[in-house]
Image (cartoon, helix red, strand yellow):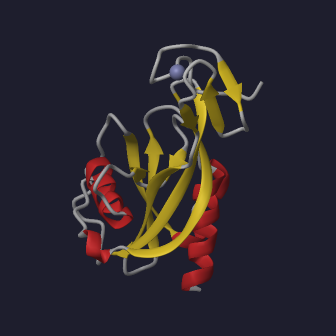
Amino acid sequence: MAESPFKFCSACGANDWINKSVREFVCERCGFRHFITPIPAAVALILDAQDRILVIRRAHEPGLGKLGLPGGVIEPEETGEMAAARETCEETGLDIAASAFTYLCTLNNRYLFQGFVWPTLDLCYVARVPCFDGLKADPAEVMETLVLPLDDAPLGEFAFESNAEVVRRLRAAVA
Ligand SMILES: [Zn+2]
């Protein structure tokens, strides 16, 4: 049986499933189809004039105490750029306009949430700031903010390999 986040049919409440595939679960009673699809998330890569990058230390699981980049799940009606700007402001206090973010790439990630490892799709954006004045970490999400030379960020300490990989790609892009 394929792993599923669905316990009961959201249409009829039954719990008899036909697993069509790793991503499609059909209610045996009423035929309602439930899917696992990648959840879009925004990731912010923010550089200052000296090519230093803004890194956060995560204050919650998954990856408690490990490094990460500002970001999070994209909300309804948001673009990726808007989510990158919002999450950056919420987590670090840095107020950057959505229009200042430029697209870099997407990467696959996986995120443990409520007992299920969801596939996510990280939409990665780059923004430039003159300096990192005004940083103010949200203690609920971020233990500390770090400003590190892009080439020196310790990739092995990142909670998610996708975050480490996008830092590698940014290094290649600005080299
Ligand atoms: Zn049903």
Q: Residue at x 47, y 53 (%)?
A: 40
Q: Say if residue 11 shows up in the picture.
A: yes
Considering every residue shown, the one lying at the far right of the view is: 1
Give the quadrant of the N terminus. Answer: top right
Total labels: the figure holds 0
Considering every residue shown, the one lying at the far bottom of the view is: 175
In depth, the one of 70 and 37 nearer the eye is: 37
In depth, the one of 24 and 100 nearer the eye is: 24
Q: Is residue 175 left or right of residue 10?
A: right
Q: Residue at x 23, y 70 (%)?
A: 97
Residue 31 vs 56, above or below: the answer is above
Residue 91 horizontal/vertical position (percent): 32, 48
Residue 150 horizontal/vertical position (percent): 53, 71
Residue 73 vs 50, above or below: the answer is above
Give the quadrant of the C terminus. Answer: bottom right
Q: Residue at x 31, y 36 (%)?
A: 139
Q: Is residue 2 left or right of residue 79?
A: right
In depth, the one of 20 and 154 nearer the eye is: 20
Residue 121 horizontal/vertical position (percent): 55, 55
Q: Residue at x 45, y 23 (%)?
A: 11
Q: Say if residue 112 shows up in the picture.
A: no
In depth, the one of 166 and 139 nearer the eye is: 166
